[in-house]
Amino acid sequence: MKKMKKILFLMLFIIPTISCSEKKIKMQAYMSPSCGCCKKWVTHLENNGFEVESIFSDNMRAIKSKYNISQDQTSCHTGVVGSYFIEGHVPADDIKKLINESPDIAGLTVPGMPAGQNVPGMETIDTNAEFDVLSVNKDGSTKIWKNYN
């Protein structure tokens, strides 16, 4: 009976406190070596379960061309996760949703550089920004993936 109580104690109190670490999502992030907001976005991703390889480049236009990201969809950095591009300050949760749902699209973008507390890497003002994360189809057309306001 004592042994049974000890096993029950272990099952109820000790074993649940042992955490199994989740497998990190691997991503490459192309950015200018002097861009501070890009580095903050990478930190946001790392704090949310991503393993990010930062690749510094002085020719970001070449990276955007490689992934067929049009001028009106660009921002300062470009991530690549699996077969998708991630352009700009896309929140980690939107990238995780993309990976989980695996739609037949080219990637996600937050065009430009909206500033606000809800924009990872662009928390330069004390209010939230209103912005859209857009999904980019393989033909270049877009639609709203998620609206933030």
Image (tube, grey):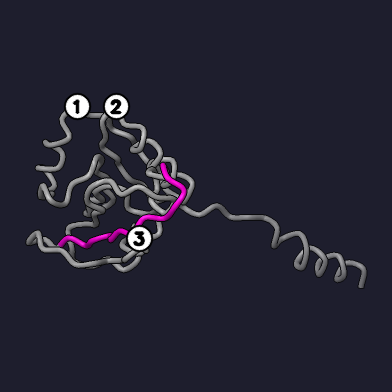
Which comes sooner in the sequence, label 2 or label 1? 2
Q: Nearer the viewer, residue 69 or 52?
A: 69
Q: Amino acid at mark 3?
A: Asp
Instruction: Kindly indicate the quadrant of the structure image that contains residue 103.
Output: bottom left
Q: Position of residue 17 (x, y in %)?
A: 70, 58
Q: Position of residue 30 (x, y in %)?
A: 26, 37
Dot 2 falls on a residue whose secondary structure is loop
Residue beneath label 3, please?
A: 94
Which comes sooner in the sequence, label 1 or label 3? 1
The label on residue 58 is 1
Q: Amino acid at mark 1?
A: Asp
Question: Within 10 Å of the Cα at label 1, are there few (<14), some (14-19), or many (20+) other Cα atoms?
Answer: few
Magenta residue span:
124-136
Q: Amino acid at mark 2?
A: Pro
Picture residue at 24% right of the left edge, 57% below the top: 108
CB contact under 8 Å: marks 2 and 1: yes
Dot 3 falls on a residue whose secondary structure is helix
CB contact under 8 Å: marks 1 and 3: no
Residue beneath label 2, please?
A: 33
Q: Report the Cα–Cα distance between label 3 and label 2.
A: 25 Å
In the rendered image, the quadrant that contains the C terminus is: bottom left
